[in-house]
Structures are given as C-alpha cells and as structure tokens.
Image: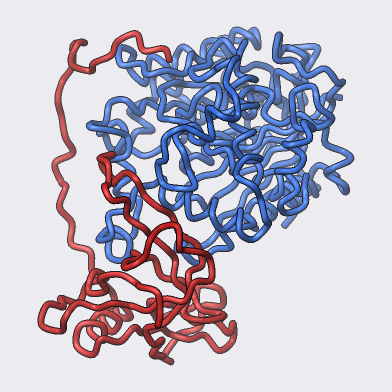
Chain colours: A red, B blue
Amino acid sequence: MIERIEKATEIRHWLGDMEADHYYYSSGIAGERFFVALRDEGKILGSHCAACNLTYVPPRIYCEHCFAELTEYKEMGKRGCVVTFTVAHYDKAGHRLDPPEIFALISFGPCTTPLLHRLGEIEPEKICVGLEVEAVLKPKKDREGKITDILYFKPAK
Amino acid sequence: MNLTKIRKDVAVVGAGMTVFARRLQETGKEMSWEAAKMALDEAGLTLKDIDAVILGSAPDAFDGVHKKGDWLLDGAGGTNKPFMRVYTGGGTAVFAPIAGWWHVASGMFKRVLVVCEEKMSSVQPHAQSAFAHIWDPILDRPLKPNLVWIFAMEMQRYMHKYNVRYEDIALVAVKNKRNAVGHPCAQLADPNITLDDVINSEPMALPVRRLDISPPSDGASAIVLVSEDVAYEHTDTPVWIDGVGWCIDTTMWTNRDLAFPKFVARAAKMAYEMAGIKNPRKEIDFAEPYDPFDYKELQHLEGLLLADPGEAAIMTREGKTQRDGEFPVCPSGGLLGVGNPIAATLGIKIGEVYWQLARKAGPRQVKKDVRTGVTQAWGDLMQFSAVIVMRRR
Ligand SMILES: [Zn+2]
C-alpha cells in the first residue's frame, strides 16, 4: 500500500472540529407511541397500511408508498424470526469485540418491516435465517423508552 | 418520463485521475486540480473553454467543513462559472457525470467539466467516525452500528436467498485485485493474491472478512463532457453517453429487499430504454459495476439484468467475468483493486468505460472488441444507484 506519509501529525497541520456536535432528535408522533408502549406496557407496536397490506415496525403516521395516513396501531407480540444476521468482530470505533456481538433483522410476520436488534443467549454457529426468536426486555423499573429497553432477542422456546 | 427526445447527444472526450492512496500532504483542492487538469489535457482543452463545472464529493464530515462544494470550488475549476455540487454518497461517482450529462443534453452548455474528489484521511480517528452520523439516531445509533455490519447482513441475505457460496464471492476480490495490476493509480493491486488469502483473512463482521472490503482512500477523478455539436473538434474517438438512469430505495435499510437490488434494476431499465437496449446481455459487451465489497459486484450485475439472481457468482466461478472472459467485469480492478475514495471512483467507473471504449486502457484493455459498456455506482445508505450506458460509434 502506498503511504508516503504515515502519520497525519508529521505534516504541517491544523487541528479542528465541527463544534455544533450536540443535537436533540425527537421521536415523532408515531415514535412517541412506540416508545411509551415499550416502556410502560412492554409492548412492541406497529402501524398498518391497509391499502399496501404492509405493517411498519416501529410505527409511522404515514405510508411512504401510498402516502396514506396510518391510524391503525397493532401489537406485534414479542416473537419474530431472523431475516438476516451478522457476527460482528469490531465495534463502531474499530475496536475488537470479544466475544463478538450478533446483530440481526427480526421480522414479526409476513408483510411487516423488520427491526434491527441484537441476538443473545445463543452461540453464533447455531444462528440461521428463519430462526424463531423472542424479545428480552429490561425489567419495567429500568425501562426508559428507548430501543435499548429491548436487551436482545433470544431463541424462542 | 421522456427518455427519447433528448436535445443533444453527449460525449466523453477526456478523463483524468490521481493515484488513489492515503494522501495526507495534498489538499482536496490540489487533488481536484490534478485530476481536472489531466482530463482537460486529454481533451485538448483549457479551463477557459469550459462552460460549466459539476463537483461530486461525499459527506462534509470527511473534511470537517460545511458546504464542501464551494470549499473545493477553485480546485475543481468552478470559479466564475455556473457550478453545482451533487452528492449521493458512493453513487456520486456515476451520478455527478449524469448531472454533467443533463447540463449538456439540455442544450444549455457545450463543454462541461465533472470533477469528483474524496479525502478520507483527514477525519480522526477513522473515516468510520464520519459514518457514525448516517444512521437513524433513535432506532439504529443506540445499538452502536458499524457500517460493515449492515453490509454483512445484506451479504448474508443474498447468500441465503440465492444459495450463493462464499468461495464464489471471494473470487471477485481475487479477480479485481489482480486486474488492478497495471493500473497507474492502484492502491490495492496484488498479482499474487489467492482465494485462500481472502477466505483466511481476518473476520470483520461475518460473513464479511477484511479482504472482501475496499478500505478508505484519498483521490480525485474528472471527465470532460461535450455536446455533439463540437465532439469531433476535440477527438476522433468520442465515447457517447447513450443512456442514463438513477433510482433510490426507502430510507429504512431494514425494509428493503436485501437480496435483490430493485433500485439498481429500475435505474438500469431507465438507462437501457434511453439507449434503445432491449436485451442487455446480448447488447452490452462489458461492465464496471460498483464493487466496494466483493458481493456487491455480483448483486449489481444481477440488478443490471446482466445475470439472473445468484447467477453472477456462477459466471465468476466459470471465469466469464475475467478481463479476457466472455463478459469482462471491472477490468479496471475496481474499488477492490484500485481503491475506494468514494466519489472519486468516477475514474474507475465511467473513466474506465471511456478508456476501454476509446481503446486507451493500455495494459488493462480487454481483448475482445468492445463497443458498448455499462457502469453503475451505489450509494447513500446502500439504497441509491446511478447507471450510465456508453458506446463507441
Ligand atoms: Zn400504503
């Protein structure tokens, strides 16, 4: 590999940053219902577009395909199946993960959009596409209304 | 959509690109100037002859400056001219040329310079840090995703649905790193790489291993586009842009068909219709699809309707996609072999198709007589595709 200068600090340089690095992201109208239901009732909600026969998980207030307003909220249950997965050996900063972490897309049934989350209580070799899993939630007192209120998904009994 | 009554035919008459490498010393502007000057020189033009300039570059976060378009303006030659920046992530490599194309095809401009630049080495500690902010802040970011993971999940889904073997995917990395030998700008060429090297390389996010990926890089590339009215004033071998198309899938990556890239197929159909191509497999001689990961070359060939789903892996195994095979794919060496400075990969996508069709590809020239080529780039959060069909007449 061609690297004429190995270290950025060996050349004349100016250190800088983009200072506005804090933002407030809001969860939106449908997001508020999703996270409150998760925190208070331990439920995973979706919203359904009858015209497209598609259920969005997490819910949205509109369908992006037909632009209908979505008002029908559904409880998805806690069981789903693995659509795809990866065994991650590095974290987002490039540091080694030991043991590796497993991430997957979980589908709550046909014609629903999958949810990204972790898998737990399973060996990487035992995972396959189609595996049935169920959500493991934090105890109610610890839940904050965040996606991490779901700890991970584990193989369903 | 009107894909037939375009006002002016548009030709590529010059291309240039810098070495792809970690280039800490040069600024992005300097690299842009170097590539733009090469393209102008090949076209026999000076900056004075250029009517308008298009700049392509990926996230502002790479450089730590906002409004990167006007930041790179002077190196790209845009000062005191009609100028615009376009940005569709990795797709910029082929989308910026499309923006240049519509400037000329509209009849508004006769000679347009398109410059694409990327400098990924400024951001610390790693370009991954800039990618951290492309995710949904509420659903994705709390799980601390790394960009490689979503590609790994896509690759897994592709392998599962179409029964594709990892060994066949890894052969793409071997082919492209070997093809890059002889490319004057290559960062990752390796004449001795073997399938075992790829298969035994370090696991990143399985099924993705280190040699399945093209790492970050710095560089710039440029092309000169001219109207049919003046093309033959500049060269005897103009290469014509006969079809363009682009399309984007949903923002939520979880909700897409991860096995078959429908948005690539939509963009390809648009470009093929404009180019009058009815049977792409018969009418196209070679392809330069976007290959930041080895499995993407295969998925993109299938999206471009040049192979059935899952078939591109078999074509690779049978050697058909080798430079001297019956359907050469990534004769440049691609992103896997030459390097991956996001937008600047213009030089190994539309740039390579131009050089191949103009028979200027030197040691990379494919053996068979090629008259029609297709190139494609893939970007935003793995959901966008731009496609260009080019011909020598
Ligand atoms: Zn709908």
The residue lying toward the viewer, choosing from B163 and B275, is B163
Q: Image check: B156 left or right of B297?
A: left
In the image, residue B323 above or below residue A4 = below
What percent of the width, then of the height, locates residue B281?
84, 42
Q: Image check: B365 left or right of A90?
A: right
Query: What residue is rendered at 71% in x and 49% in y?
Result: B302
Rendering quarter of residue A12:
top left
What percent of the width, then of the height, locates residue A127?
46, 63
Q: How many marks?
A: 0
Query: What residue is rendered at 75% in x and 48% in y?
Result: B311
Which quarter shows the N terminus of chain A? Answer: top left
Which quarter shows the C terminus of chain A? Answer: bottom left
Whether residue B140 appears in this view of the structure is yes
The residue lying toward the viewer, choosing from A56 and B98, is A56
In the image, residue B137 above or below residue B169 = below
The residue lying toward the viewer, choosing from B243 and A134, is A134
Rendering quarter of residue B313:
top right
Query: What residue is rendered at 65% in x and 12% in y?
Result: B43
What percent of the width, then of the height, locates residue B87?
46, 41
In the image, residue A73 above or below residue B292 = below
What percent of the width, then of the height, locates residue B174?
61, 27
The residue lying toward the viewer, choosing from A127 and B95, is A127
Q: Image check: A56 left or right of A145?
A: right
Whether residue B52 appears in this view of the structure is no
Q: Image check: B337 left or right of B264?
A: left
